[in-house]
Amino acid sequence: MKFINSVAGKIGLEQLGKTLIHEHVRTRSECVPVQFPRLYDAEEEYRLAMEQVVAVRDRGVKTIFDPSVMGLDRDVSFMKRVSQDSGVQIIAATGIFTFHYLPTRFEANDIDFMAEQFVKDIEEGVQNTEVKAGFLKCATEIQGLTPGVEKVLRAVARAHHRTGVPIMTHSAPSEETGLLQIQIFEEEGVELNNVLIGHCGDTDNLDYIERVLDKGVYIGLDRYGITTTITTEQRNKTVRTLIEKGYVKRMFLSQDYCCTTDRLKPESLKKSLLPDWSMTFLLDKVIPTLLSQGVTEEEINIMMNENVKDWLS
Ligand SMILES: [Zn+2]
């Protein structure tokens, strides 16, 4: 691949620049906004998204990959508006974010029916717009490979074969589900250097992370600022150790920040629970700390600018 679909059209890989590989300009419960719109404030969501995206733009970020898909209330028109108004390139995804459940429409149809929908999102456009998806997304949480989850993984693999766009996952390192995802992708014949196993930094179990890396995939150390499960220093230590072991060309740093989420009230999100979580934390605090601990500018550049091009090509 020499080009990727952004929400504003095709862009060359050289245009990607400094990239945040996993952030969300907005997430919401699927269905709830349609049924109970009084709970949501679209303009406030836009304001909060712009606040963060403009802040990272001012720190040199050119591109954000937003892996919101079905299950996170993906809205490519919202993404496009934020992209146009901020000047930051946003790459939208297709796929399904589920830990077990599938809607009857997909339950009642086979894997290839699902794959076909993903392919159309990539080749024709998402949600009856001209915005095309640039990558594929799926999830395997602590529930493991439920029938619904396995169907999504196989459909994602088949859509990858038909389109060539890469795959990003949400995984649960505590249950080693990254390896389950890899197993399904191998069964479907996916070349694993097209796969990014997300959230590997949520553990400091290096044995597990290396078993994932040794399959030839990319990994996301992509939840900086989420300190409920693991501290920032533990995340940093994992990053430093993996670089020392020679894995820098397989690693991505990001925050999985959600400019809005209806899972937590904004007050608890900001103050007590996750005080550091934002789209700028990595750039303002984490990278300077890593540099002071011996990581080089060149290694940061590889993780923030170079690896994305390799993953896509
Ligand atoms: Zn995410």
Image (spheres, rainbow, N blue to C red):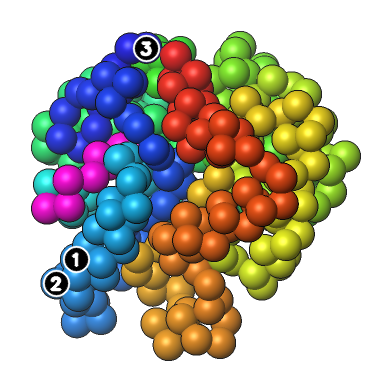
* Residue 4 vertical position relative to residue 225 in the rendered view, above or below: above
Q: On the rendered image, what quadrant is the N terminus found in?
A: top left
Q: Front-most of 212 and 311?
A: 311
Q: Main secondary structure of the magenta part?
A: strand
Residue 72 image-quadrant placement: bottom left
Q: CA distance from mark 1 to mark 3?
A: 32 Å
What residue does disc 2 label? 43
Q: Are marks 1 and 2 in contact (CB under 8 Å)?
A: yes
Tell me the crowding category of disc 3: few under 14, some 14 to 19, or many 20 or more residues within 10 angstroms, Cα based.
some
Q: Amino acid at mark 2?
A: Glu
In primary-sequence order, the first of circles 1 and 3 is 3
Q: For the residue marked with disc 1, what is the amino acid?
A: Tyr
Which residue: 30% across, 40% down? 62
Q: Amino acid at mark 3?
A: Met
Secondary structure at numbered mark 1 = helix
Label 1 sits on residue: 46
**Highlighted range, magenta:** 85-94
**Tag 3 residue:** 1
Seen in the picture, residue 313 relative to 94 is either above or below; the reply is above
